Image (cartoon, helix red, strand yellow):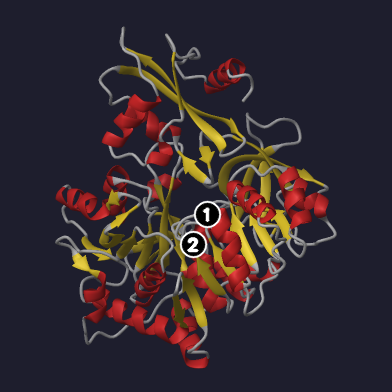
């Protein structure tokens, strides 16, 4: 692959990334960025510890040698169809095949693109052509949804259309995963550039359409090194991976940690707290990370089963508001574990690494922790109260750009800091607390929902004149999405009818509003902007403060 540098950007393998030569040199000098890639780590692991089990998926155990063998076979099949720099998508649950796809794409010098299985055709029709995906790996069916049929519809609307590969099921006219692995191609694997894009993930933004976040081999490597240093990770530790592997967190715990930090990933296809307790006990899991609902339900299940999960030494909680009382109760119950809050985003993962000192339970519960390798600034913002500011962050683990460079226009400041859109304050100088959001995002069960994206689809309904989607606090999910509608005279809508419309437009179910109300008009300011703070206040008052 050739690399061409331009002012503020660099072209590697056909992908334009943000580039600051001085900061890159510093990251290399400090060891956060290195010249080798995950491909080198896989080769070394297969040679030195071929029988070490790196992934557990139900009854299946994958060792280093087997993972390398399958990933190389897949990489050669990919290179027979696409070129280094192309994108390979996979819409899989937490299955061991996802690790093979991720590593196969990596060995082929391609961009791995994990997709949440809960997304639907509407999102795929945006992401796949946006990224230029050449292939997509899917289950045949999962949780009563026919992915093979959905992708047939998606392919019909795309030109060029990606090849569809079906994992664990009948191919239904697509390519079968097992057949792909059995192919034999005399293709050399490329030499990888650690500054090239390794992974792209789409995240909901305030402007409606999801934005593709690009990470390089080195930005991911810096993230993994940071977590290895701060999260008490030792060789032989076992991570229970319940977070989706299509999130930045789940992906590194399942795909990167086992090779770079010599851990083992115990995969959960679907969250079940009682099963999680059993898996932690059966495999001696030492680490887990997840959003607030994961910690709440794990604690409840452990209490029901009368276990304190003694092998668990770290639980990292983030992705949504984390009640301090929950952290305290979990820390007290899990006798050998440190439970802490962290903060970050897909763009700058793990900005704060939490508080892992067992003697500092107060900061672990009441703050989002100290920054790790990231630099953090608080900038003035109209939504900030005295002593607060918008959180700006940069570091060697930050994104190398968006798939569409135009999306970067208002995201970075003059010094290259990423504007998170979150409001925060410092506690005791070193500890960050996220106190609110300046951007219009709903976080439900750790998933980001763009209200504008949902509003845009609602406004396509012939009977809906105006629509506003807002989030209100919810003790179980973090936030509950409310849709406030203005409709044509005589037309009434409820949760069921709104959900049916969104489902018909193939909008993922987790984005559907959980409450629907109808008003005569939406409150607006003099320039016509909808005043969502007034909507939230009115809904909170009407619902008794929910």
Looking at the figure, which quarter contains the C terminus? Answer: top right
- Badge number at residue 268: 2
Residues at marks 2 and 1 touching, judged by CB atoms closer than 8 Å: yes
Q: Look at discs 2 and 1 and give the one toward the viewer.
A: 1
Residues 103 and 432: in front is: 103
Does 402 sit left or right of 350 as displayed? left
Q: Secondary structure at mark 2?
A: loop
Looking at the figure, which quarter contains the N terminus? Answer: bottom left
Does 141 sit left or right of 317 as displayed? left
Is residue 497 depicted above or below 488 in this figure?
Answer: below
The residue shown at (20%, 51%) is: 149
The x and y percentages for residue 44 are 49, 88
The x and y percentages for residue 13 are 34, 69
Tag 1 residue: 272
Among all residues in the image, which is located at the extreme front?
Answer: 305
Label 2: few (<14), some or many (≥20) within 10 Å? many
Residues 474 and 525: in front is: 474
Q: Report the Cα–Cα distance between label 2 and label 1.
A: 8 Å
Q: Secondary structure at mark 1?
A: loop
Does 311 sit left or right of 469 as displayed? right
Is residue 194 depicted above or below 350 in this figure?
Answer: below
In the rendered image, is residue 228 in sight?
A: yes
Indicate the quadrant where residue 181 lies: bottom left
Label 1: few (<14), some or many (≥20) within 10 Å? some
In the rendered image, is residue 190 in sight?
A: no
The residue shown at (31%, 7%) is: 490
- Badge number at residue 369: none
Among all residues in the image, which is located at the extreme right?
Answer: 359
The residue shown at (71%, 55%) is: 340
The x and y percentages for residue 359 are 85, 60
Does 30 sit left or right of 514 as displayed? right
């Amino acid at each position: 692959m050739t690399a061409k540098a331009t002012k503020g950007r660099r072209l590697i393998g056909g992908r334009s990334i943000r580039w600051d030569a001085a900061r890159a040199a510093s990251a290399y000098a400090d060891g956060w960025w290195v010249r080798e890639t995950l491909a080198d780590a896989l080769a070394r692991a297969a040679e030195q510890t071929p029988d070490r089990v790196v992934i557990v998926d139900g009854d299946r155990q994958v060792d280093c040698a087997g993972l390398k063998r399958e990933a190389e076979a897949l990489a050669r099949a990919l290179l027979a169809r696409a070129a280094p720099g192309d994108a390979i998508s996979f819409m899989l649950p937490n299955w061991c095949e996802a690790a093979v796809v991720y590593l196969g794409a990596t060995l082929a010098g391609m961009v791995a693109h994990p997709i949440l299985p809960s997304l639907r055709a509407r999102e795929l029709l945006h992401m796949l052509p946006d990224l230029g995906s050449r292939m997509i790996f899917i289950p045949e069916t999962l949780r009563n949804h026919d992915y093979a049929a959905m992708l047939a519809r998606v392919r019909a609307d795309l030109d060029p259309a990606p090849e569809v590969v079906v994992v664990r099921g009948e191919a239904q006219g697509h390519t079968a995963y097992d057949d792909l692995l059995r192919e034999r191609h005399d293709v050399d694997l490329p030499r990888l550039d650690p500054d090239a894009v390794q992974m792209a993930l789409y995240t909901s933004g305030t402007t409606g359409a999801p934005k593709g976040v690009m990470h390089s081999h080195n930005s991911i490597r810096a993230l993994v090194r940071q977590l290895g240093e701060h999260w008490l990770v030792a060789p032989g530790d076992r991570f229970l991976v319940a977070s989706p592997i299509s999130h930045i967190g789940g992906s590194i715990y399942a795909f990167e940690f086992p090779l770079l930090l010599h851990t083992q990933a115990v995969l959960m296809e679907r969250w079940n707290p009682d099963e999680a307790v059993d898996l932690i006990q059966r495999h001696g899991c030492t680490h887990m990370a997840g959003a607030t609902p994961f910690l709440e339900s794990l604690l409840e299940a452990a209490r029901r089963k009368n276990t304190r999960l003694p092998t668990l030494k770290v639980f990292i909680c983030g992705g949504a508001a984390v009640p301090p009382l929950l952290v305290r109760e979990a820390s007290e119950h899990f006798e050998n574990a440190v439970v802490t809050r962290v903060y970050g985003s897909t763009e700058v993962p793990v900005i704060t690494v939490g508080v892992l000192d067992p003697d500092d339970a107060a900061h672990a519960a009441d703050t989002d922790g100290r920054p790790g390798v990231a630099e953090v600034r608080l900038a003035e913002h109209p939504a900030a109260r005295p002593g607060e500011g918008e959180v700006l962050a940069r570091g060697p683990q930050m994104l190398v750009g968006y798939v569409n460079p135009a999306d970067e226009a208002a995201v970075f400041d003059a010094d290259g800091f990423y504007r998170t859109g979150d409001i925060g304050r410092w506690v005791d100088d070193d500890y960050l607390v996220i106190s609110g959001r300046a951007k219009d995002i709903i976080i439900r069960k750790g998933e980001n929902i763009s209200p504008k994206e949902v509003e845009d689809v609602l406004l396509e309904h012939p009977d809906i004149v105006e629509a506003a989607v807002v989030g209100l606090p919810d003790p179980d999910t973090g936030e509950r999405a409310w849709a406030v509608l203005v409709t044509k005279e005589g037309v009434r809508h409820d949760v069921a009818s709104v959900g049916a419309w969104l489902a018909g437009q193939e909008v993922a179910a987790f984005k559907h509003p959980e409450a629907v109300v109808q008003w005569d008009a939406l409150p607006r300011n003099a320039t016509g902007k909808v005043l969502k703070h007034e909507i939230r206040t009115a809904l909170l008052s009407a619902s008794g403060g929910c």
